[in-house]
């Protein structure tokens, strides 16, 4: 080690290590894009090369879209995640406001239940909720995908913590101005809580876009499939034969969130690390 | 106006403004609104969360099977069967092995990357983005990519091993390597998340502490790490370990799509067993018992975490 | 414009009595300050008047009409909060317009996109715009109308909050320590502005503050609260010169009134520090407390003496802190002429005129005194 130039050496070492790690992190993405761009013959050759000799991305994409109704599955993903988020906000915000700013009999109990609810992993309630949906005749529908998640105790908790920081005077001012309690939730608290709602929204959308367990359990029909389920089925039906289209399909499925992430990294990291406090 | 009187109580300490709302003694309009506001949430919580939680525990004492016309209470029978079942023990052992490999792997790698990123100033956000990318990408899609990367013949991994003159493996098809392959995917996916939590922890360490350490004679980077960074990161580290533990316990996606627990049960894990019993064989009671076992493990970990969170440790 | 009457208002929080029976009447067009130490229940009382907090018992009447079952917004009072409580997401204009929109627009007209299309809404919005513009003109905030609260200074926010209160033309204005978040200089300036606003609007103002100087300088009447009770109300001069209770005497005035231990003799005379005062009272013999304001202590002559332990020379005036010999009591004397400030640690003689003395019984209640008339006319000097 050269003691005369310790700083450049350390900086170079830092970059070398980080780039090596980054290559490892990116390898699957690169391999996915590479494979999705190769024709069948190149994929099934034992010679390793990343840049295809002959670009076949368009063909692979076309085949992927032909074999599976990818647009429909993406649309399903949008419908399900957006419905879940909107309903979660509609249910959680009023409750969070009441828990933060109103006093009523049973408030402490309700809040204790919310805190307890956060501890319950989603897999734990899967069987009874499944039976419930079965009894209600709701299995294999959008409702089955959305209803169980309309209640986000974590969302209630998060919003309540945020509302606690909104000054009481603001709520009182709104009352003096003639805004009803219900109006205060949407006209005063929601605008004040936009950053928290955004973070929660990213958290919620990412979690449900990527969720595999629940759609796997409740869905049967092909036309309702969410993106992860679609990839899994694609893989099962094409196993070992057409990797090019499979990789192209995987690319399409991860693209929406990855692109959104690249555009708003800070917000995404903020939103997703919320799972940390969950 | 009342005249002065000396029977005034001791000065009343001002309470925090936050507690300043009260149940209206009369005109209970506001309390009424409060109930209207919380009713949807409370009802849904009961139906979708607390009810089912009680339900899963109750179910574990029955022989209920989906579609069966009757069921009966069978006490601890499910648990007896479970503990006598070799598959359950295999699943538990595999789950624990997965946790024991993925947690240290993802925590140490996450910490190392965070330290490396934070030790310089250039390209910080680029590196952060790259390492965080796997957290964002749909795991199922990436699992499929990994499967092809691990393809015995045409995969990238074996290709590179071969060109380095090393032996190749049939990673996911070999009972000796399948679980480790899944662990590698698990670590790959979790590292970025842990890194971000560690970065947040590192940023919050006051700079003066490093300057003080330098003056106190901690001249090497390692000495400063031992003296300042590691102790200051203590709570974050505990927290990241617990979180990683809980998430690893829930491993399911990669197993289900890549190995279905095989080959020969070498990657069977708890949630996958629960899924198979409950949603493929529809033995709801038995699957509920597995869920309860899973819940006990996760709640134990979660309780440790909420203890830590109660101490006011926040990481975002 | 309104007259507000409170009768027997009681309030407790979690079993602690915060208001212990407040009876009080605010006259139409009056600027009244509710003043008292922190935690004495001023805000609670104001919030009960506003309807934001229900009382446990007692009644609030506005213009003779009980309002206890009426919602805050329907009482037609306006409130200015300590933190201003401006809606952070709305512009100055929209902040001021909120009470008008809530009152004048129907629920449908208030709907986000749809409402804006209704012709009836557009007509009403025109009026609202004109009203807000008028208020902004009066308060000199027209250039700020498009800004959000985050882009305003403390004083500007204060004005917007006042504008939001004014725009609805309320029966009365309620202020809860509206100046305490401002820096000292701005606070003094805003005092004058608020007093001027009151003169212009001629509306009823109820002004809560813990700062006795604010109460003294702005209001036409002051009500002093202590420990959940209203102990005295009167004009600033009455409260200052004729405190009915030693706690009022001690709370009002800065520096604080000097309190010396005294004794009432059987014959009604009063002794302080071994000297008889030239006055008498008809109270029973026993201990009492003798209050003298700092500006009424005359330095240089008199029957008492003390040593100078601390000096505060403010340029225009000076405060001399004395410790009496023997008894070791501390007193503060105000010196109008700073050219004659005594030296530190020097011994100074002092005294005070009999009419400067206020006497309180051991419970703190004021005791009426009679001055010895003849003496006073002949020699107004010292005791
Ligand atoms: N919502 C509440 N819950 C409990 N105690 C309260 C509440 N609001 C006020 N208090 C108590 O009532 C007393 C009077 O408070 P407040 O009216 O705010 O005093 P002030 O405005 O004179 O400083 C204080 O001791 C305060 O702690
Ligand atoms: Mg107050």
Image: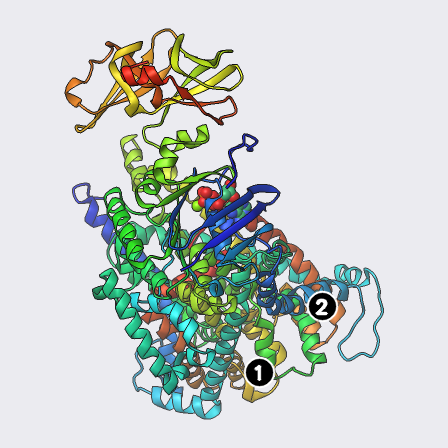
Q: In which quarter of the image is the N terminus of chain C?
A: bottom left
Q: Name the residue under label 2.
A: B287
Q: Is residue A179 above or below residue B104?
A: below
Q: Could you say which quadrant of the image residue A133 lies in?
A: bottom right
Q: Mark 1 points at which residue?
A: A142
Q: Could you say which quadrant of the image residue B61 lies in?
A: bottom right
Q: Is residue A162 left or right of residue A233?
A: left
Could you say where residue A15 lies in the image, as x and y percent from the top left?
27, 56
Q: Residues within 10 Å of mark 2 (few under 14, many from 20)?
A: many
Mark 2 belongs to which subunit? B
Camera-side residue: A194 or C48?
A: C48
Q: Tally the marks.
A: 2
Could one spot residue B313 in this view of the protein? no
Q: Which mark is residue C362?
A: none
Q: Distance between the residues labelled 1 and 2?
A: 25 Å
Camera-side residue: A37 or C285?
A: C285
SS at mark 2 in the image: helix
Q: Is residue C118 left or right of residue C4?
A: left
Camera-side residue: B70 or A149?
A: A149
């Amino acid at each position: 080690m050269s003691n005369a130039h310790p700083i450049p050496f350390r900086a170079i070492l830092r970059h070398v290590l980080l780039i090596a790690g980054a290559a490892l992190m990116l390898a699957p993405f690169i391999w996915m894009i590479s494979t999705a761009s190769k024709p069948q013959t190149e994929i099934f050759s034992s010679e390793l090369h990343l840049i295809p000799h002959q670009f076949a991305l368009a063909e692979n994409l076309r085949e992927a879209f032909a074999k599976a109704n990818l647009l429909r599955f993406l649309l399903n993903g949008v419908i399900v995640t957006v419905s879940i988020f909107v309903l979660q906000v509609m249910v959680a915000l009023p409750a969070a406001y009441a828990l933060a700013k109103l006093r009523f009999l049973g408030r402490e109990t309700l809040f204790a239940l919310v805190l307890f609810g956060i501890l319950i992993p989603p897999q734990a309630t899967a069987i009874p909720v499944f039976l419930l949906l079965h009894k209600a005749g709701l299995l294999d529908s959008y409702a089955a995908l959305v209803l169980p998640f309309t209640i986000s105790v974590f969302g209630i908790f998060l919003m309540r913590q945020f509302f606690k920081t909104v000054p009481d005077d603001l709520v009182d001012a709104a009352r003096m101005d003639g805004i009803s309690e219900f109006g205060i939730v949407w006209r005063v608290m929601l605008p004040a809580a936009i950053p928290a709602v955004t973070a929660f929204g990213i958290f919620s959308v990412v979690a449900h876009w990527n969720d595999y367990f629940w759609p796997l359990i409740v869905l049967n029909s092909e036309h309702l499939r969410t993106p992860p389920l679609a990839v899994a089925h694609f893989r099962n039906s094409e196993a070992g034969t057409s990797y090019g289209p499979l990789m192209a399909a995987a690319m399409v499925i991860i693209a929406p969130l990855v692109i959104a992430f690249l555009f708003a990294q800070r917000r995404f990291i903020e939103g997703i690390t919320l799972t940390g406090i969950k | 106006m009342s005249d002065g009187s000396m029977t005034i109580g001791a000065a009343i300490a001002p309470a925090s403004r936050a507690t300043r709302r009260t149940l209206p003694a009369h005109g209970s309009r506001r309390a009424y609104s409060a109930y209207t506001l919380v009713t949807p949430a409370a009802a849904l919580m009961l139906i979708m969360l607390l009810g089912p939680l009680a339900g899963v525990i109750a179910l574990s004492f029955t022989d209920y099977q989906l579609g069966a016309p009757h069921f009966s209470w069978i006490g601890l029978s499910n648990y007896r069967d479970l503990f006598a079942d070799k598959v359950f023990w295999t699943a538990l052992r595999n789950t624990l092995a997965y946790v024991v490999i993925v947690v240290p792997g993802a925590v140490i790698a996450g910490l190392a990357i965070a330290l490396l990123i934070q030790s310089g100033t250039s390209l910080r956000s680029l590196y952060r983005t790259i390492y965080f990318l796997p957290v964002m990408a749909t795991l199922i899609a990436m699992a499929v990519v990994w499967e092809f990367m691990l393809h015995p013949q045409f995969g990238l991994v074996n290709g590179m091993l071969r060109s380095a003159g090393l032996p190749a493996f049939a990673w996911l098809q070999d009972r000796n390597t399948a679980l480790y392959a899944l662990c590698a995917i698990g670590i790959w996916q979790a590292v970025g998340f842990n890194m971000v939590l560690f970065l947040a922890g590192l940023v919050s360490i006051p700079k003066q502490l490093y300057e003080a350490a330098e003056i106190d004679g901690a001249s090497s980077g390692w000495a400063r790490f031992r003296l300042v960074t590691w102790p200051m990161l203590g709570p974050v580290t505990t927290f990241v370990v617990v979180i990683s533990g809980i998430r690893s316990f829930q491993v399911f996606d990669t197993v289900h799509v890549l190995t279905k627990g095989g080959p020969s049960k070498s990657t069977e894990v708890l949630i996958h067993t629960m899924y198979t019993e409950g949603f493929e064989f529809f033995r709801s009671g038995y699957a509920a018992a597995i869920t309860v076992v899973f819940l006990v493990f996760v709640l134990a970990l979660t309780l440790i975490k909420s203890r830590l969170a109660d101490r006011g440790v926040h990481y975002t | 414009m309104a007259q507000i009457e409170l009768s027997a208002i009681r309030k407790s929080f979690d079993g602690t009595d915060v208001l212990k029976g407040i009876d009080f009447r605010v006259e139409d067009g009056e600027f009244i300050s509710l003043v008292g130490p922190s935690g004495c229940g001023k805000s609670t009382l104001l919030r009960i008047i506003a309807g934001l907090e229900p009382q446990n018992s007692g009644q609030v009447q506005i213009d003779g009409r009980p309002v206890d079952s009426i919602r805050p917004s329907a009482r037609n009072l306006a409130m200015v909060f300590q933190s201003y409580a401006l809606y952070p997401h709305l512009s100055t204009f929209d902040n001021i317009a909120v009470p008008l929109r809530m009152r004048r627009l129907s629920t449908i007209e208030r709907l986000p996109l749809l409402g804006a299309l209704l012709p009836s809404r557009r007509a009403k919005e025109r009026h609202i715009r004109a009203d807000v513009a008028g208020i902004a003109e009066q308060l000199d905030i027209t250039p700020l109308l498009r800004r959000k609260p985050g882009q305003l200074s403390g004083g500007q926010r204060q004005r917007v909050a006042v504008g939001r209160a004014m725009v609805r033309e309320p029966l009365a204005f309620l202020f809860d320590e509206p100046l305490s978040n401002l820096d000292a200089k701005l606070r003094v300036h805003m005092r004058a502005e608020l007093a001027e606003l009151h003169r212009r609007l001629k509306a009823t103002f109820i002004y809560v503050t813990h700062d006795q100087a604010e109460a003294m300088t702005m209001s036409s009447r002051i009500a002093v609260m202590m420990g959940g009770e209203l102990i005295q109300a009167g004009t600033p001069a009455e409260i200052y010169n004729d405190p009915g209770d030693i706690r009022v005497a001690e709370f009002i005035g800065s520096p604080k009134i000097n309190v010396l231990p005294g004794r009432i003799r059987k014959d009604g005379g009063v002794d302080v520090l071994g000297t008889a005062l030239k006055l008498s009272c008809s109270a029973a013999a026993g201990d009492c407390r003798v209050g003298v304001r700092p500006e009424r202590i005359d330095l240089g002559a008199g029957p008492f003496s003390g040593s100078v332990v601390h000096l505060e020379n403010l340029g225009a005036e000076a405060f001399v802190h004395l410790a009496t010999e023997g008894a070791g009591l501390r007193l503060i004397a105000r010196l109008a002429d700073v050219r004659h400030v005594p030296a530190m640690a020097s011994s100074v003689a002092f005294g005070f005129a009999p009419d400067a003395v206020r006497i309180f019984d051991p419970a703190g209640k004021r005791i009426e005194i009679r001055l010895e008339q003849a003496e006073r006319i002949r020699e107004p000097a010292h005791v």
